Image (cartoon, rainbow, N blue to C red):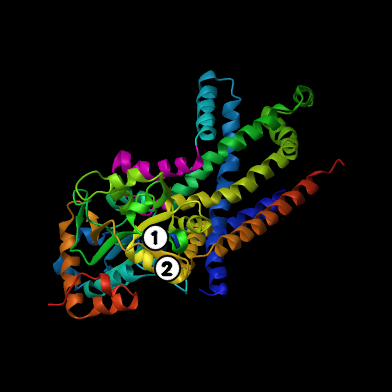
Amino acid sequence: MKKYLILLMAVCAVFGFSACGDSSSSNSGGSSSSSSAASSSSSSQKENTDSEKKTFTVGFDAEYPPYGYMDDNGEYTGFDLELAEAVCELEGWELVKTPINWDGKDMQLNSGAIDCIWNGFTMNGREDDYTFSIPYVDNSQVMVVAEDSGINSLSDLSGKTVGVQAASAALTLLQSDEEGGQKALADTFASLQEFPDYNSSFVELQAGSIDAVAMDIGVANYQLKTRGEGFKILDEVLNSEQYAIGFKKGNTELCDIVNKDIEILTDNGKVAELAEKYDISDLLCLEAK
Amino acid sequence: MSFSTILFQLGSGMLKSMGIFLWTIVLSLPLGLFVSFGRMSKNNTLRNIVKVYISIMRGTPLMLQLMIVYYSPFLLFGMNIKSFRFPAIIIGFAINYAAYFAEIFRSGIESMPVGQYEAARILGYGKKQTFIKIILPQVIKRILPSVTNEVITLVKDTSLAFSLAYMEMFSIAKQIVAKESTFMPFIVAAIFYYIFNFVVATFMEQIENKLSYYR
């Protein structure tokens, strides 16, 4: 018994500590520099040396291609993350990519666990809850249906079951009865089914247990590209809206720095280049001066 | 993403799952023993407090407990929870599993015939000596099958850490699924979990065999 206990402890020490080390490095980034970018002033940042590098912690949903996801090598990448990387290069910050649970994003942001939400984050309707950067992508919420479903317009969805991601902008839109909201449309559905991720909603769409899925057009394009035939996007869109970077309400200091950098990156063509790479050039709403 | 990358990513997630598993075992087994003492205490207040604790831990979902442990320092005290993710997961798992282990320990300890305590006293054993040298070794033998049950459940429960966005195997499998748009990574993850549990079950069986010295 004792022998096993010692063995167990030894194994535990090895895995436990390694896991612990991993988590602190991936979650809190350079834990040595306790001051986050949020509390720093813009003027001194460029003089920072490596030992005193400011960290810039971006919270993102790692299941949200093409804006933030795991690439072929197992690294987190995407349009938004590469743009964040470019901002960090300009400022001399160290980028910490923290995957978050989309449901828990407010708690993460308000508690200071992340500096911003930068992940295809719809600003419309959320203006009161966050300090937003300048919008960078024109997004619209669309409906994806099976190609042979015979559904060609939003009115065809009457009496159908529609899927949507939990806590997503599409869900808010379908529940909003304010101007521009689509609650009236949603009321014609047989039911509105919330899903934790797009993959399960697509499988259900394929299996026929739901008839349509509401999602952001960029995500819809990616899904259709990787899944191939069998789906289509309805021409009628639910709304048009913008993506911006969400900072904690009142954190205008950090927001201003990032805004300025995004303008620089737009002017020098970096933004357009990244949009090209991730196939979202049509959606980009930043223009070089 | 190539299959070998998927294996590698899931493998690294597996190490984190194992980290949760091993830390939880090491912390919750001793804690469970002490909780079981509290549960069997002659002191009414202590016994009732422990009863309420066990009742809450068993009566609410582990996923919610994890979220409460992780977010409450911020919600209650406004603390920064940046590097609290892993500790919160371990605390959440340990206090939850300690409650289950406590009841298992209690079942073992209470199944011991009073005659053994009487015989020990006549032979001049003190209370502590009686427990450590005579009662506990038998208790461990008796409760091993139930403990194995819990331990195997724990392996699978580590996947609940995804709710705090901790990058253990299940979270990573979900991300790869999102990227690749296929369910295949889930199958691979299932095989990983099965292998892990197979090793754990075999290990527990070995201990059981080692301890069955009277057969």
10 Å crowding of disc 1: few (<14), some (14-19), many (20+): many
Considering the image in quadrants, where does the C terminus of chain A appear? Answer: bottom left
Chain under callout 2 = A
Is residue A91 toward the left or the right of residue A31 in the image? left
Q: Tell me whether the residue at label 2 lies in contact with that at label 1, contact meaning CB atoms closer than 8 angstroms.
A: yes
x then y, percent, for residue A12: 58, 56
The chain letter under disc 1 is A
Residue B36 against residue B62 in the figure, above or below: above
- Residue B31, compared with residue A98, is above or below; it is above
Left or right of B78? Residue A286 is left
Residue type pointed to by label 1: Val
Residue linked to disc 2: A224
Picture quadrant of residue A222: bottom left
B152 and B117: which is toward the camera:
B152
Return the x and y of residue B95 as percentages of the image width and height: 51, 39
Q: Is A210 in the magenta? A: no
Q: Which mark is residue A144?
A: 1
Q: Nearer the viewer, residue A105 or A122?
A: A122
Q: Position of residue A20 (x, y in %)?
A: 47, 58
Q: Do marks 2 and 1 share a subunit?
A: yes
* Left or right: A217 in relation to B1: left
Quadrant of residue B214 within the rendered picture:
top right
Question: In the picture shown, does residue A267 fall above or below B69?
Answer: below
Magenta-drawn stretch contains B64 = yes
Residue at horizontal 72 percent and vertical 49 percent from the top: B204
Residue numbers of the magenta segment: B61-85
